[in-house]
Image: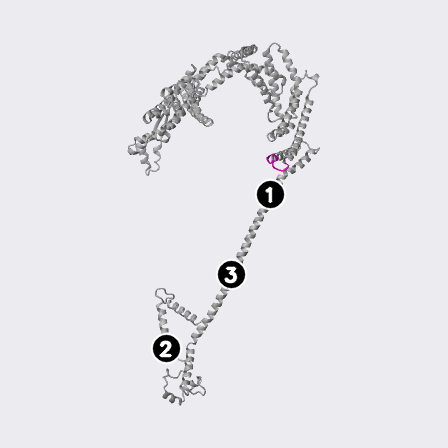
């Protein structure tokens, strides 16, 4: 304990010594505080007089000697009281030195105690504080221990809570998964459970196909069948699928039975009696079509549902086919006797005139087919595929007849074809004569048509010139807008430019006969110098200095504008066609010129120029340049016509008689189209087959010629020019600059090959010579036709 107190005192002294340290003072004092401390220290050096001594005694006590003590002991002084008050030895006498020393030690001790009492009290108070602080520290330590335990408990509880939370989340997720699984299973089972419900509804005698619940029932069956088809791995899936198909077949049988009842009833209601058939010409259309059409809405409501679902299942397609057969069978029952009677009447009426028989039969057939076509789409929304079978069958039979290639085999059809050709020519000549007589010879001119010379004097020349100038300007703007619309619609600049060239040429030709002056003088006043007049401080001075407005005269010549616009459009067309022919070559030449210009640049060093060569560039190696030349040459061959194909056309035309074949094909095209439309009139089809065979043989030569001509029409640019311009001289004039540009591009390429490439590289490139390019470009349509 003593060592501990000494150590603590040493620590206290060290800390106290740091209070006024010069380097790191813990409690620095001001000068006033230092003066007060000095005064207190001076006062503290003087020992305070003991409180138990009387104040009237002298200020000090002289040391007692043995003689003085004897003298004083006999006197009655205040010292006696002092001696009395103090604890003297027994008898209040000091008899020897030992007693004196003991008494003096006690006295000194009491004085010390009195002198240091305050300090002791302070020390005791500090001790108490220390004990309190110790107790507080102990409480704090216990509190910290409690907090540590509380923290451990909190961590434990938190861990438990988190684990519980995670477990709850896991259970919720598992619950959600199980609920989703249960719902998924329930949704999947719903398709299987629908079987009993659907079967029950179909077994009801009160179920009607026209009720509101029947169509949703079909939709639900379609969903179930589609689901079972897409999930064949489910247990008993095939069994349920078969049962659903049975239910679907039962529902479709109800639909077919309902439609059959409607059609049979309608046929029985409108079918005439046998004795009334010869006299029913007037009301035949009303009976066969008007009354029969009244039942269409009830049938079409069901057939539309079948047509919508034909792609879902073959059962619907089969049911729709059965409905078509039911419809056609009833129409055959209804129309068969009437058509047979009509054909017999036509045959007896035109016994010797086969052409008249053909015309009358075709006319009758067209009316019947049109009426049946309209009636069919009153009952059904989509066309029937039965026509495809009839067409294929008749096409196959016609193909068999075309196998007769020899003259002997075709001799049987010569007279018939010749008679038909003569009939067509006769009709064409007759219609031409009728037109000449009615619209030319017997034309009755109105009063306005004969208003001459008033028409020629309707307005003054200056007024006409002003209007014509505005009309020409409007026409040019309208044509340019139309050109932009064609380019936007067709995505073809070539068509737009040719359209504008064609109509500008037409416009120039139209205004040539008028011989009018299309130029006008327009006068304008230029007020541009008056803009800054308001900013001048002296308005009068500014007005005088500026003067009068400047007069500007402009001459506007619309005819010259037409020529200028035509020139610009032709130049654009020439550049565009040149780009079409030589776009790969132009792209290569532009890149090659960049490399050549770098070689000629004075700022580039000699070493760099030596490394920069055209042949070393990746895009200019001989193999790549060969591809560029071949692609350009291919484009030219594709876009330009080949004269050999035109020669083939001419040869074939001479051999087969192109003019006769084309005329015959034009006259019989309408008949062929009408024959293909036949659907239900079986008896008339037999007559048409013969006609189709005849036409097929005659048109075989025409087809051959057309195929050859189509093969020759691969020249896109020349075809477009011929289609729009229709003038060989204009085409030749317009194509001549294109030819020059293409030749110039190939000439530049040949010069580049001579300058930059070796003989071996030129062989690899295989660039066409100028003669080859000229020969290819010279195959114009005019030369081809010759």
Residues at badges 1 and 3 in contact (C-beta under 8 Å)?
A: no
Q: Which residue is mark 2?
A: 46
Q: Residues within 10 Å of mark 1 (few under 14, many from 20)?
A: few
Total numbered badges shown on the rendered structure? 3
Is residue 301 rendered to the left or right of residue 478?
Answer: right
Q: Is residue 155 magenta?
A: no
Q: Tell me where residue 13 sits by quadrant.
A: bottom left
Name the image quarter holding the N terminus: bottom left
Q: Tell me where residue 500 sits by quadrant.
A: top left
Q: Tell me where residue 772 sits by quadrant.
A: top left
Regarding residue 349, the answer to whether it shows in the image is yes
Foreground of the two, 717 or 547: 717
Magenta segment range? Answer: 228-236
Foreground of the two, 150 or 322: 150
* Secondary structure category for the residue under label 2: loop
Q: What x and y, as percent, mark residue 57?
A: 39, 84
On residue 181, the disc is 1
Q: Which residue is mark 3?
A: 147
Q: Residue at x 54, y 55 (%)?
A: 158
Is residue 733 rendered to the left or right of residue 385?
Answer: left
Magenta: predominant secondary structure element?
Answer: loop
Q: Residue at x 32, y 26 (%)?
A: 755
Q: Is residue 442 above or below residue 47?
A: above
Foreground of the two, 81 or 610: 610
Q: In the image, which is nearer the foreground, mark 3 or mark 2?
A: 3
* Secondary structure category for the residue under label 3: helix
């Amino acid at each position: 304990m003593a060592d501990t107190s000494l150590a603590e005192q040493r620590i206290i002294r060290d800390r106290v010594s740091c209070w006024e340290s010069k380097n790191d003072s813990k409690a620095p004092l001001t000068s006033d505080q230092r003066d007060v401390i000095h005064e207190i220290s001076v006062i503290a050096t003087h020992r305070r007089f003991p409180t138990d001594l009387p104040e009237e005694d002298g200020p000090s006590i002289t040391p007692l000697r043995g003689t003085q003590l004897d003298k004083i002991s006999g006197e009655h002084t205040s010292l006696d009281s002092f001696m009395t008050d103090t604890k003297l030895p027994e008898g209040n006498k000091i008899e020897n030195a030992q007693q004196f020393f003991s008494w003096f030690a006690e006295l000194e001790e009491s004085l010390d105690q009195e002198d240091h009492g305050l300090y002791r009290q302070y020390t005791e108070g500090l001790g108490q504080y220390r004990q309190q602080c110790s107790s507080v520290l102990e409480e704090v330590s216990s509190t910290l221990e409690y907090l540590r335990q509380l923290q451990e408990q909190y961590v434990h509880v938190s861990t438990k809570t988190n684990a519980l939370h995670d477990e709850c989340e896991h259970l919720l997720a598992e619950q959600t998964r199980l609920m989703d699984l249960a719902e998924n299973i329930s949704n999947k089972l719903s398709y299987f459970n629908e079987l009993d419900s659907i079967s029950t509804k179909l077994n009801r005698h009160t179920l009607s196909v026209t009720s509101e619940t029947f169509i949703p029932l079909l939709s639900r069956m379609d969903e179930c069948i589609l689901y079972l088809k897409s999930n064949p791995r489910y247990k008993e899936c095939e069994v349920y699928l078969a049962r659903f198909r049975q239910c679907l077949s039962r529902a479709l049988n109800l639909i077919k039975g309902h439609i059959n009842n409607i059609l049979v009833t309608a046929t029985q209601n409108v079918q005439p009696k046998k004795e009334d058939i010869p006299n029913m010409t007037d009301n035949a259309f009303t009976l066969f079509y008007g009354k029969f059409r009244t039942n269409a809405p009830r049938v079409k409501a069901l057939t539309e549902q079948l047509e919508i679902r034909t792609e879902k299942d073959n059962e619907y397609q089969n049911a729709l086919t059965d409905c078509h057969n039911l419809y056609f069978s009833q129409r055959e029952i209804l129309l068969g006797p009437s058509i047979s009677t009509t054909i017999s009447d036509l045959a007896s009426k035109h016994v010797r005139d086969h052409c008249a028989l053909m015309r009358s039969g075709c006319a009758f057939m067209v009316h019947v087919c049109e009426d049946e076509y309209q009636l069919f789409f009153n009952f059904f929304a989509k066309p029937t595929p039965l026509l495809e079978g009839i067409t294929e069958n008749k096409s196959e039979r016609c193909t068999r007849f075309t196998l007769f290639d020899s003259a002997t085999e075709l001799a049987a059809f010569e007279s018939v074809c010749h008679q038909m050709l003569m009939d067509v020519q006769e009709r064409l000549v007759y219609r031409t004569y009728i037109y000449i007589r009615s619209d030319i010879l017997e034309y009755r001119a109105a009063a306005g048509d004969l208003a001459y010379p008033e028409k020629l004097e309707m307005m003054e020349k200056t007024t006409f010139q002003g209007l014509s100038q505005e009309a020409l300007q409007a026409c040019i703007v309208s044509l340019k807008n139309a050109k932009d619309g064609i380019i936007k619609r067709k995505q073809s600049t070539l068509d737009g430019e040719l359209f504008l060239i064609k109509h500008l040429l037409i416009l120039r030709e139209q205004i040539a006969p008028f011989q009018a002056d299309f130029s006008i003088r327009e006068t304008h006043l230029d007020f541009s110098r008056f803009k800054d007049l308001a900013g001048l401080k002296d308005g009068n001075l500014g007005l005088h200095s500026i003067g009068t407005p400047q007069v500007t005269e402009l001459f506007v010549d619309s005819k010259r504008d037409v020529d200028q616009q035509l020139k610009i459009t032709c130049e654009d067309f020439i550049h565009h066609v040149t780009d079409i022919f030589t776009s790969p070559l132009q792209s290569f030449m532009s890149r090659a010129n960049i490399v050549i210009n770098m070689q000629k640049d004075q700022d580039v060093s000699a070493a760099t120029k030596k490394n920069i060569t055209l042949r070393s560039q990746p895009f200019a190696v001989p193999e790549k340049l060969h591809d560029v030349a071949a692609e350009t040459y291919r484009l030219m061959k594709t876009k330009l016509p080949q004269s050999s194909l035109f020669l083939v056309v001419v040869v074939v035309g001479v051999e087969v008689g192109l003019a006769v074949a084309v005329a015959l094909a034009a006259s019989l095209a309408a008949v062929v189209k009408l024959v293909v439309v036949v659907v239900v009139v079986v008896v008339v089809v037999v007559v048409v087959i013969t006609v189709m065979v005849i036409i097929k043989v005659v048109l075989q030569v025409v087809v051959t010629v057309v195929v050859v001509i189509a093969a020759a029409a691969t020249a896109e640019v020349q075809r477009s020019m011929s289609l729009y311009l229709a003038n060989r001289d204009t085409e030749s004039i317009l194509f001549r600059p294109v030819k020059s540009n293409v030749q110039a591009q190939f000439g530049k390429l040949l010069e580049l090959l001579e300058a930059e490439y070796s003989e071996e590289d030129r062989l690899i490139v295989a660039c066409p010579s100028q003669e080859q390019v000229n020969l290819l470009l010279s195959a114009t349509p005019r030369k081809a036709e010759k």
